[in-house]
Image (cartoon, helix red, strand yellow):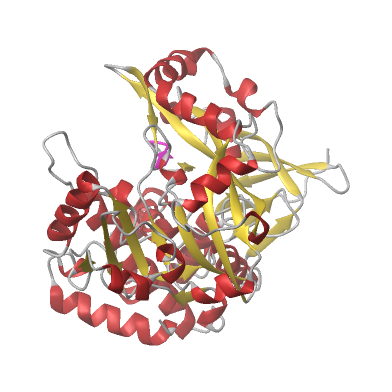
Amino acid sequence: MSKKSTDTKDMVLIGAGIMSATLGMLAKELDPSLSIEVFERLDYAGGESSDAWNNAGTGHAAYCELNYTPQNNKGNVDVLKALRISEWFENSKEFWAYLVERKLLPEPSTFIRKVPHMSIVWGDENVAYLKRRHKNLVASPLFKDMTYTEDRAQMEQWFPIVMRGRKKDQKLAATRMEIGTDVNFGALTRHMFDNLKAMPGVGLHYEHEVEDLKQMKDGIWVITVKDLKSKSRFKIQSRRIFIGAGGATLHLLDNADIREGRGYGGFPVGGQWLKCVNPELIDKHWAKVYGKASVGSPPMSVPHVDTRFIDGKKELLFGPFATFSTKFLKNGSYMDLPKSIELENLIPMISAGYQNIPLTKYLIEQVRQSPEDRLAALREYVPYAKMEDWVLQDAGQRVQVIKKDDEKGGVLEFGTEVISSQDGTAAALMGASPGASTAVSIMLSLLPVFFRENSTKAPWKSKLQEIVPTFRKFVREDEALLKETRERTSSILGI
């Protein structure tokens, strides 16, 4: 085994997705002298969960995603999570605007476009829920401009293909946020890495797989890397490691053997889209229209009729439909799930499985779906849909986090989980929605873990204020500050 480098790097990023790209860009902006190495097993960046075809939702700002505003058994709608996510998305837009101004990102339309975000529900109970949700949300400046309607004529203007052919006696309600966006996180990731690799002290290595992580007594990490083309292996040393490898993170976290990461398990959930191939339908629809998830389904399976821009082309997708595979990555191994089971996470995984029988039932039903079943699901949202106008397209693979719980033994988490070591030298990110859309806030919160001393000093605080002006400020309550930042980022990003 050859040794490629004898010097100790400041940071190694494992996985070239949106999380690693964001952390790398933030770190280099705060300290240009940092040395960073990035290792990615694919031959390009953003090829797994960050890719536009694999990403179950784009531009998550909680405007239309009903799973972020749950209703309890008394009919009260909790909007706190939606407020947080919406604030975090404002942080993301601020960071991207900063990079555009600094010429570290190209023309914004290559990765972000303005697309209205809408929700639609039907039936008395769901209409009552949406009305309560709207009332609670518009109390915050973040959602002040959200429009609610039960007027069918208005809805026909908002989303004609969703309304055409719908039963006249069906009770409907919808909300609309005009300032919604579509974000191509695959393109954004690749743009950031294009600039990162040109910076002094940054090495970007595609078709390289991290096989082993070992921390020495002095706290330095020794990383064993395999060159997938030459089949050779080498070791590299680093003061810090970030594992942002999507579904592969669980295996690498186990390999790193940090105390905080013990006992975690993972449950893989895949997805598929129905992709529209009828130009007339694609042209008529200009929105992200979300409905309510089926009982027992994971949040990534919230059905939506979705306008996307991928590789400069307008697309129309419906779904996603859940699939099941024991792979943890789209390009992974069928042995990923079996190999992840060990003594420390066995009880949490069994407990979580027992508590989520409806999810198991849902996945079985989804896997058994016929083309006619998928068409029937589509027709709930696009009533006059025809089989010949839509083709099945594979989406990505997610690993939902399973962690220990003192009362329940183990719980299945549907959000994004960050695990960091007590000594501040290692961190890993697992989970799914809202994921990419809140990458900036997640990575900003990780910086004080990795750079404890610098993060408290005036130069860092001042620079962070320049990069993300409203970070850790409650714009949900400050209408003037929110108006100021939205006007600025919208102007810079062309949205």
Q: Residue at x 60, y 30 (%)?
A: 368
Residue 421 among magenta residues: yes
On the question of residue 95 being in view, the answer is yes
Q: Residue at x 23, y 82 (%)?
A: 484
Q: Observer-nearest residue: 374 or 153?
A: 153
Residue 54, how many percent across, how many down? 59, 53
Would you say 76 lies left or right of 323 here? left
- Quadrant, the N terminus: top right
Would you say 415 lies left or right of 391 here? left
On the question of residue 239 being in view, the answer is no
Dominant SS in magenta? strand
Would you say 175 lies left or right of 135 here? right
**Which region of the structure is painted magenta?**
416-422
Q: What is the residue that sits farthest to the right in this orientation?
A: 230
Res. 451 image quadrant? bottom left
Residue 21, how many percent across, how many down? 54, 61
Residue 290 among magenta residues: no
Q: Is residue 138 above or below residue 96?
A: above
- Quadrant, the C terminus: bottom left
Would you say 308 lies left or right of 413 here? right
Q: Observer-nearest residue: 139 or 267?
A: 139
Q: Observer-nearest residue: 370 or 386?
A: 386
